[in-house]
Image (spheres, rainbow, N blue to C red):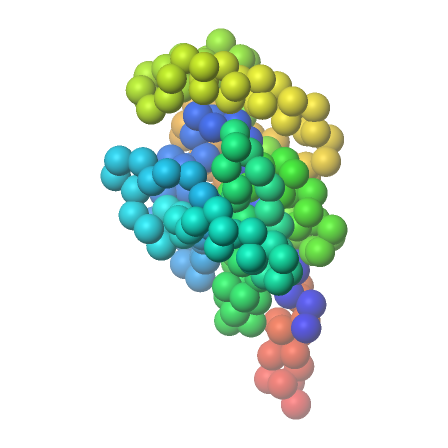
């Protein structure tokens, strides 16, 4: 059953405000499922296994790759990140909107499986603002921040592959844009909605 219209993919540099926007969106939109990625990176202070990420070992992740258990996966900053197929299919069959937060490579991989999925690139107005936000988070070393900035620049080259772009300069404006896109998805037609409305008309 084709339910890919219920998929929303967000990508963008670390520090662009994706998590803050998602936290607000979940307060306002019902029937939204956040696809929790699996990762081999170390858990940060305040993170909860199974809530922010599924933290697994490198061996376990590589077994998942071998067994084709991931919808998409990538190696970023020497750590694996990926999305389990089973959790996504379960949420789609429950007619939920599935929200992915992945990098550009992940977005391209998901779009290959689900070409009718909607995608948003979220970023800052420029590199200087992103750098300032990364420094103020006080989570990464200077070297890691530099790597993130270089990675962000490379990801910006793929902007044309996204359906929408949100410049998170003014948080309220960015949030309203995010909500508008999400609300439009609730009215997109898909096989399950068609099946249900046709039953009501029998």
Give the image location of residue 137, x and y in percent: 33, 22
In this rendering, would 1 be left or right of 77?
right
Judge by depth and name the residue closer to the eye, 121 or 29. Answer: 121
Give the image location of residue 38, x and y in percent: 47, 50
Up-down: is 30 above or below 17? below
Residue 63 occupies which quadrant of the picture? bottom right
Residue located 59% across and 33% down the image = 121
Give the image location of residue 61, x and y in percent: 51, 52
Residue located 69% across and 68% down the image = 2
> Which quadrant of the rendered structure holds the C terminus?
bottom right
In this rendering, would 63 be left or right of 135?
right
Answer whether residue 109 is visible to the viewer in this image. Answer: yes
Up-down: is 112 above or below 11? below
Answer whether residue 92 is visible to the viewer in this image. Answer: no
In this rendering, would 63 be left or right of 140?
right
Residue located 50% across and 37% down the image = 79
Residue 25 occupies which quadrant of the picture? top left
Judge by depth and name the residue closer to the eye, 133 or 48. Answer: 48
Judge by depth and name the residue closer to the eye, 197 or 43. Answer: 43
Give the image location of residue 17, x and y in percent: 43, 30
């Amino acid at each position: 059953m084709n339910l890919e219209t219920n998929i929303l993919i967000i990508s963008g540099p670390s520090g662009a405000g994706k998590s803050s926007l998602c936290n607000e969106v979940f307060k306002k939109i019902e029937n939204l499922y956040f696809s929790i990625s699996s990762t081999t990176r170390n858990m940060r202070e305040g993170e909860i296994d199974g809530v922010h990420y599924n933290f697994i070992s490198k061996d376990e992740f590589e077994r998942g790759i071998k067994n084709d258990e991931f919808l998409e996966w990538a190696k970023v900053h020497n750590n694996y990140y990926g999305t389990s197929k089973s959790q996504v299919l379960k949420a789609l069959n429950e007619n939920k909107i599935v929200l992915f937060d992945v990098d550009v490579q992940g977005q391209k991989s998901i779009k290959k499986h689900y070409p009718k999925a909607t995608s948003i690139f979220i970023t800052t107005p420029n590199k200087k603002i992103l750098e300032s936000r990364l420094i103020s988070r006080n989570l990464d070393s200077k070297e890691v921040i530099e790597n993130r900035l270089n990675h962000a620049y490379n990801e910006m080259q793929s902007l044309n592959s996204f359906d929408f772009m949100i410049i998170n300069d003014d948080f309220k404006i960015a949030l309203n844009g995010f909500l508008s896109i999400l609300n439009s998805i609730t009215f997109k037609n898909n096989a399950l909605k068609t099946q249900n409305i046709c039953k009501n008309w029998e």
